[in-house]
Image: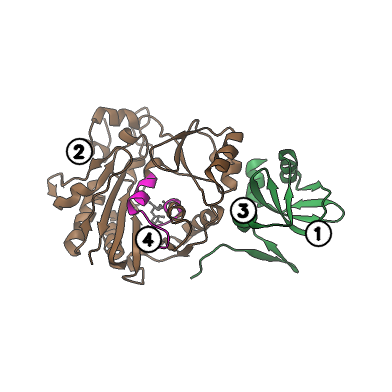
Chain colours: A green, B brown
């Protein structure tokens, strides 16, 4: 028997933080948090990808809009942010 | 003509006419806000920005929806800020009053409305074992536990009447499978709109569950038996059965919304006299699903 929330998942060679974990504990993160305006957030959800200019290393990032932490996305060079939100979230909201 | 089993309830339901006219209207929608993931201010402003209008109720953290909408299609839902849930569904949990650090068992937990409410009252501390015998219903339970960001919950799949680890829980909730007539509505011909089929021997299952739940409590522990039926055979009769078999004690409890005491007889059958300490909630009095709640102590 196990308590707790799944924290990370293996995706190929990497570990991806789970949506549920960052939604609950993401406010404790002090780096790799990307703030998006509501419009950017909506585009990321609907298009699955947006162009961004970030001064961080590529990899998984926490996505926040206003005071809400939405989940995880993948930041790739040069300047691409790829949605890694659950499918259900996109379907319900877009 | 009002169909059975509702017609039988004329014997004890107060303001029968008001009850019947309430049954002809749809039930209003309610939700609970989850404060484990964000402060209530953030939850409200997020829902507000989506046009979700909430009206306060007398049950803490429960709100009535201004207009019935698809709450599952909101951002607030996907961020785990809300759990759509009937107002009366919060009452068994308030009666049980789980506290931080408690060891709690929810014997019939899926899809997790009450388990996740308990996790919230416990500040996500202690341990909740959320059990359900139907494996297929555990997916929804697991999804809700995760969506609400809860970390103190273990999910198990036992027949409640065979649940192991006796005598160890501070609190046990039995939100029993029932005929569900507290939710029933009537159509324009006064026919029942909801009808569950294939539910036989419910009182037998309920009696087995309540007895097992009692044995799972530590001495001094508290259990709540609840249903969303108004049928005394699934309520006071089940509680009376336990009190005959075990030295349990019904505890008084003051609910935050309109209630009536439990019954001590129905259709010529007598129930344990302390059943007046059970609480009955009628749909037309509370504008939500009808409920029954009994709070029981296992004395030391
Ligand atoms: C009224 S529902 C529970 C609702 C839940 N407490 C909530 O608030 O979301 C009753 C549950 O009991 C489960 N159940 C039925 N028979 C059972 C048994 N013998 N042992 C354990 N669970 C059982 C059903 O699968 C169903 O999920």
Q: Position of residue B203 (x, y in %)?
A: 26, 55
Mark 4 CB near ligand 1 (8 Å cut): yes
Q: Bounds of the magenta span?
A: B89-115
Do marks 4 and 3 both belong to one polypeptide chain?
no
Do marks 2 and 4 both belong to one polypeptide chain?
yes
Marks 1/2: CA–CA distance:
68 Å
Establish if A25 lies above or below A88.
Answer: below
Marks 1/4: CA–CA distance:
46 Å
Q: Which residue is mark 1?
A: A58
Task: Report the disc number at residue A23.
Answer: 3
Q: Residue at x 62, y 43 (%)?
A: A92
Q: Which residue is mark 4?
A: B107
CB within 8 Å, label 1 to label 4: no
Task: Say what secondary structure mark 1 lies in.
Answer: loop
Do marks 3 and 1 both belong to one polypeptide chain?
yes
Task: Report the disc number at residue B12.
Answer: 2
């Amino acid at each position: 028997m196990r308590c707790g929330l799944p924290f990370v998942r293996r995706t190929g060679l990497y570990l991806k933080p789970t949506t549920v974990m960052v939604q609950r504990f993401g406010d404790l993160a002090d780096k790799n948090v990307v703030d998006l305006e509501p419009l950017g957030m909506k585009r990321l959800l609907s298009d699955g990808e947006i162009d961004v200019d970030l001064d961080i290393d590529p990899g998984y990032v926490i996505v926040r809009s206003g005071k809400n932490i939405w989940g995880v996305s993948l930041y790739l060079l040069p300047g691409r942010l790829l949605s890694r939100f659950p499918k259900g979230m996109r379907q319900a909201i877009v | 003509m009002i169909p059975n089993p509702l017609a039988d309830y004329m014997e004890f339901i107060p303001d029968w006419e008001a009850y019947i006219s309430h049954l002809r209207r749809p039930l209003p929608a309610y939700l609970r806000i989850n404060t484990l993931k964000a402060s209530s201010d953030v939850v409200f402003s997020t829902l507000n920005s989506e046009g979700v209008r909430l009206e306060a109720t007398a049950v803490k953290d429960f709100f009535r929806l201004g207009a019935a909408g698809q709450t599952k299609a909101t951002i607030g839902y996907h961020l785990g800020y809300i759990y759509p849930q009937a107002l009366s569904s919060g009452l068994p949990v308030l009666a049980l009053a789980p506290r931080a650090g408690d060891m709690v068992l929810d014997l019939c937990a899926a899809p997790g409305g009450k388990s996740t409410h308990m996790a919230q009252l416990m500040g996500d501390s202690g341990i909740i074992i959320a059990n359900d015998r139907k494996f297929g219903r555990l997916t929804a339970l697991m999804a809700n536990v995760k969506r609400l960001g809860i970390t103190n919950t273990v999910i198990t799949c036992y027949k409640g009447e065979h649940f192991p680890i006796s005598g160890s829980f501070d609190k046990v909730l039995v939100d029993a499978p029932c005929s569900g007539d507290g939710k029933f509505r009537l159509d324009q011909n006064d026919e029942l709109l909801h009808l569950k089929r294939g539910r036989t021997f419910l009182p037998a299952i309920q009696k087995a569950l309540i007895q097992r739940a009692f044995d799972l409590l530590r001495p001094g522990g508290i259990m709540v038996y609840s249903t969303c039926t108004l049928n005394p055979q699934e309520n006071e009769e089940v509680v009376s059965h336990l009190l005959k078999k075990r030295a349990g004690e019904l505890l008084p409890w003051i609910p935050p919304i309109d209630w009536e005491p439990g019954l001590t007889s129905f259709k010529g059958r007598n129930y344990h006299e302390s059943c007046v300490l059970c609480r009955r909630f009628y749909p037309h009095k509370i504008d939500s699903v009808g409920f029954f709640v009994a709070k029981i102590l296992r004395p030391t």
